[in-house]
Image: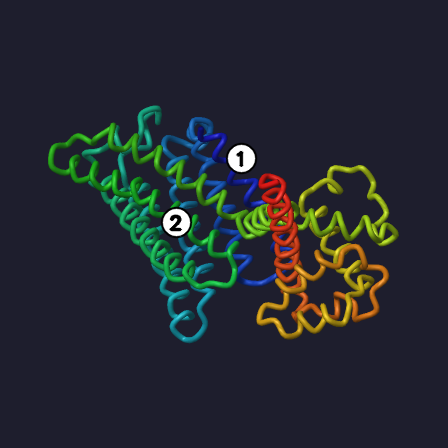
Amino acid sequence: MTAAVAVLAWIAAFYRLHVFRRRFDFINGAYLCSISLAGAAVTVKAAEPSIDAEAGPYVGDLVKHLLVVAMGVAVQLYLGAIEVGPRATRQKWVASALASIVAASMVASFLAAPIHFGDGHIDLDLAYADSGWVQLYRLAFNVYLAYVLVDIVRLCRRYSSIGGDEGRSTNLRLIGWGSATALLYSGSRLISLSAAAWTGKALPAVEAAGSAAVMVAVAVVAVGVASPRVVPWLRDRRAANAGVPRLERLWQDLTEAFPPVVLAPAHPSRAARRPEFVFDRRLVEISEVLRLVQLPLFSADAVRRSPNPLRELGQELWRQREYWSTGTGPNAAALMPITDRAGEPLALLALADAYAAAGAREHSAVDSRQVRA
């Protein structure tokens, strides 16, 4: 599990490196550092036996925990950079100073602890649970980690509620959820530390549950890193899957009436078969054909007078479909309500819905007459 989480974290780090190279700024740099440090910490955890064999007992533990401290301050700097002003600047300095003090106290406690002559095969928290220096080391690390995680959860809750960017909001929510899950790790260590202080024995089962929780937390955060790119893609894919069937009836009738407007067949690649590509082609072709469809003057007047011009235009298109190429009035595109480029797909979808609904009502009426006859 540790190796899989490490791979996932490094994939997320390489993605953030790509983003950082495209947009070189402090926020992206801090984000890159935080996820890279998370990947490094998990990698060190996987390689602890080798590190301890080369550098000495429990050095892997120290390196891993220092990387986590650095990751914590990097995440705080990233989230703090979203804010501006004197308060944000002060928070950056406080976060950096606090992390430095904690790291120095951890190194000092580690060097002073009587742990440098063992074999390092037994977990540090269990082998030296009754050592005052080890308890100080664990206390400094886990209290700091809990403080950072609570701060991250607080900031993520605040900023994820700001609308306007679904990818960013999902990113912050996943970071917040991952941080909340990681609190189980620091909580388990503090509970075990309290038990060791009172009884001289740690709680292996509690610590094992905390270790599993932190792996889940890193995986959730790593997935969240890619959400600013993945979430818009999923949203567009979902919209295209829903939109193509809605456009089908109107698109089919329009392109049958004006075949030359249909775009040349794309190369039969996987990209050309994607729902987003098909959806965009349908929109372009419908928009072009509407410029060629001419409606009678009385149909145009009915559309202009209607409180719902899109619905009325869809109904008139259905009623006059046999005369699209022989009409003498304005073209259908000129009767569309004026909208910006971003609103055009919604307008065309509404038009297609009205057109399909008019056809469905007519077929229903015909079927009813046939049944009565």
Q: Quadrant of the rendered structure where residue 188 is? A: top left
Q: Residue at x 63, y 54 (%)?
A: 358
Task: Name the amino acid, label 2.
Answer: Val
Q: Nearer the viewer, mark 2 or mark 1?
A: 1
Q: Residue at x 38, y 40 (%)?
A: 62
User: Residue 308, position in %: x, y?
Assistant: 59, 68
Quadrant where the C terminus is found in the figure: top right
Front residue of 373/209: it is: 373
Front residue of 182/224: it is: 224
What is the secondary structure assignment of the residue under circle 2?
helix
Residue 33: numbered disc: none
Q: Residue at x 80, y 62 (%)?
A: 293
Tag 2 residue: 69
Tag 1 residue: 7
Front residue of 336/370: it is: 370
Task: Name the amino acid, label 1.
Answer: Val
Q: Residue at x 20, y 31 (%)?
A: 202
Answer above or below: position of 199 versus 18.
above
Q: How many marks?
A: 2
Query: In the shown orientation, is residue 257 left or right of residue 29?
Result: right
Answer above or below: position of 135 versus 260.
above
What is the secondary structure assignment of the residue under circle 1?
helix
Q: Are marks 2 and 1 in contact (CB under 8 Å)?
A: no
Return the disc, 2 or 1, that comes first in the chain's sequence. 1
Q: Quadrant of the rendered structure where residue 300 is? A: bottom right
**How far apart are labels 2 and 1 at the CA level?**
21 Å
User: Residue 189, position in %: x, y?
Assistant: 26, 39
User: Residue 297, position in %: x, y?
Assistant: 76, 72
Query: In the shown orientation, is residue 191 left or right of residue 19?
Result: left
The figure's colour scheme reads rainbow
